[in-house]
Structure formats: structure tokens, C-alpha cells
Amino acid sequence: MFRRNYSSALLEDAVDQLASLPGIGRRTALRLALHLLGEPRENVEQFAGSLVRLKRDIRQCPVCGMISDDGTCPLCDDPRRDPTLVCVVESLRDVLSIENTGQYNGLYHILGGIISPIDGVGPGDLRIRELIERLETGIITEVVMALSTSMEGETTAYYLYKQIARFPVQVTAIARGVGFGDDLEYTDELTLGRSIANRQLFKP
Amino acid sequence: MFRRNYSSALLEDAVDQLASLPGIGRRTALRLALHLLGEPRENVEQFAGSLVRLKRDIRQCPVCGMISDDGTCPLCDDPRRDPTLVCVVESLRDVLSIENTGQYNGLYHILGGIISPIDGVGPGDLRIRELIERLETGIITEVVMALSTSMEGETTAYYLYKQIARFPVQVTAIARGVGFGDDLEYTDELTLGRSIANRQLFKP
């Protein structure tokens, strides 16, 4: 920040912390710190407080694993959602992405990660038991897999499939293929290859 | 974030706060909030604490107006800096920018703004009296104006010039002209015009 050591330890500390956020470099962190320095003290305290409260007070929905301010989440509680349909995802982020499409009206099940021996994440670390418990209620008729196409994602999907097999549910997976508006030229070979193999009836 | 109202009030609040930072949109704010949600609680508390401490504990150097953890700032205290030379700037940001060039070895005087009747900022709101007091010590021999070229900046510089006139100091201003590496074609007419008028001896 300063070429020589003229700076303030307080400012350096705040910049270090801000620069630890994803996508925030030291230049931006300094800009943000100076912005906060120019704000009234109450605003900065409110800002900081909201982040502490987010981490401290947020709960997990015991059913789907979504974040929840208290008890089961509003999504699980919504009578307009189809309770027979459950989409299995890795994280909250994926739920937000799917919700943003407006194309899905079922419930979710957040695993909280994927099986990854390298990172020391085994099936026991994921919310698989909770999914089994939901299936045991007999309400669910279809489980949609929406896990990543990485090796870990495929492994997790396969493991789940084996666990689910004994229940009378249909197991589906989200469609993979060339994205809308994507040029074939710039689509990776695996995606393009699979999208040809999984071609569908043309519906004009 | 959510198309329907499924979200958490805690998350919404944190996203609102993060999105209030300059250059941070709601998408980025959500990404940052989810990142913090995934961090250990101590880290989030340390993060928030550093911002509160920055605002609460930082002091202003009584001499130059720089931020300081305590008393006069390390810049004013540094015996290697030339105390006869003082550069007048609007804000801490400007000090950081000039320091980054490594081309200046004098001291600074931060006004804390510029005269702007529209924003209700008059000469009395700026650290002009403190500058006069520094000049009265008789140590300073040159005052470098590094204010913005806006109408407010020019007004402030002129006002300061009148206030300083009674002291035996040289008043200078940073050079304005076409930036290094800038194309003449894309330089605004005012800058280019002045850079021709203020042309200097060619030193090859």
C-alpha cells in the first residue's frame, strides 16, 4: 500500500481481511477500507454486525439442508412446491442457481459437498442419511441428480444411485449438452460428444 | 436472489450490507456472503472486528491529517522526509497515489475535501487553519498544490493561494499534460491544449 512503512496497522489489518475475500485484490480491498473509513461509525458497526450475525445465527433446515433462520426452511414449508420431487445438489449455491431459472417446482436436498477422498470427504460427511430418511417417508417419487460432472460428482451420483435403488423412486439427472447460444466450435469435445449421443426429437 | 421469498433474513441483510460497498453488485455480494458463511466463525468475527476497529480506533495526525494509529503519523515523524516541502491534497487516497510513485520525499497536508458550495463545504470545513499554523512555524519553503482540476479544485487552490500569499513560500502545482503512453488522439482537448501551452525544454 505504502512503499515505505508509513501505514496504519489498523488499515493494513482491514485491507488484509478484505483482500481475503474471493475476487477482491489488495487494490480493491484498500478502496473498500477507505470507503468504510469515510462512513459513519454506526454504519460500519451495522455492516460488521450483519456478517457476524449471518455466521452466528443462521441455522440449517433439518430436512433439506438449506440455510434457515429457524426450523425447517420456507422452501420445504411452501405448500405450492411439489413434495414428490427432490433435486439433489452439492450446495446452497446450486439451489440459488436452479431457483433463478424458475423452471423447477420441487424440493431440494443439499448434500453439503461431494465424495472426495483427496479432500477427506467420505459418504458419512454428506447428508446422505437424511436423504434416505426422506425417501423412507414414501412421499418422494422422483430424485433429480444435479451434481457436477467432475469425477467426484459422478462418483457421488453413482454412490447415491446405489443407496437409492431399493426405493420405488425414479432417479433422473439434469440434461447435459451444448448451452443455449453457445457456438459448437467453442464447446468442449466431451459436452458436444454427449449432446450428440443424447440427441432428442426435434420439436419445432 | 430468490425469485420467490424463500431466502433467509440474515442472508438478505448481509447481502444488502455487502452490496452497499462501492463496486460490489448484488451478485458479488451474494458470493461474498456465501463465502463468509463457509468460513469458520472465528474468521468471520475477526473479519468484522477488523473493520469495526479500523473505524473506531483510527486517529488523525494532528499535523498533516493522515490516518494514524496514535499521535502524529509515521510520515510526519520520519526524519528522512524533507520538512520544508508540503504537498496539499484532498484526501488520504491522493497521498497513497503520490507515495506509490516513489517520486516525492516531502510531507503532506490533507485538506479533507475541497470547497464546494453545492455540497455545503466551505473553507472552514477544510484543514486550512492547520496549514496556516504549519506555515507559521517558518520551516516550510514550498507548498505543492495537488488538487483536482475540477472547478471546485481550482477554486480551492485559488483560495489557498490567497491565504498563503503572505508567507515567504514558493507555491507550485503538479504538472498537467498528456499522460505517458497516452495517444494524443484520445487525449481530451483541454489537457492537450494546456500541455502545448505549458511545453517544456526537450531534454533528450
Image (cartoon, coloured by chain):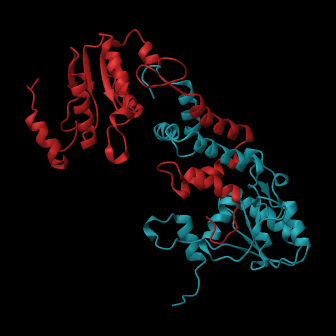
Chain colours: A cyan, B red
Q: Nearer the viewer, residue B19 or A60?
A: B19
Which residue occupies the foreground of this view, A64 or B26? B26
Q: Give residue B80's position: percent from left, percent from top.
A: 38, 10
Residue B102 appearing in the image: yes
Residue B35 shown left or right of residue B133 in the figure: right
Residue A151 coordinates in the image, percent (x, y) = 68, 57
Quadrant of the image occupied by residue A132: bottom right
Give the residue drawn at x 70%, y 55%: B10
Residue A108: tell me if it is visible.
Answer: no
Q: Is residue B71 above or below residue B125?
A: above
- Between B155 and B38, the residue placed more toward the observer is B155
Q: Is residue A7 above or below residue A158?
A: above
Residue sitting at x 68%, y 65%: A95
- The image position of residue A177, as x and y in percent, is 57, 72
Among the 4 quarters of the image, the one containing residue A70: bottom right
Whether residue B39 sits left or right of residue A138 in the image: it is left
Residue positioned most to the bottom: A204
Q: Is residue A67 positioned above or below B47 on the image?
A: below
Residue A124: x and y, percent?
Answer: 85, 53
Q: Quadrant of residue B148?
A: top left
Residue at 54%, 29% (x, y): give it. A12
Q: How many marks?
A: 0
As drawn, is B20 to the left or to the right of A78?
A: left
| The N terminus of chain A - image quarter | top left
Residue depicted at x 67% and y 56%:
B11
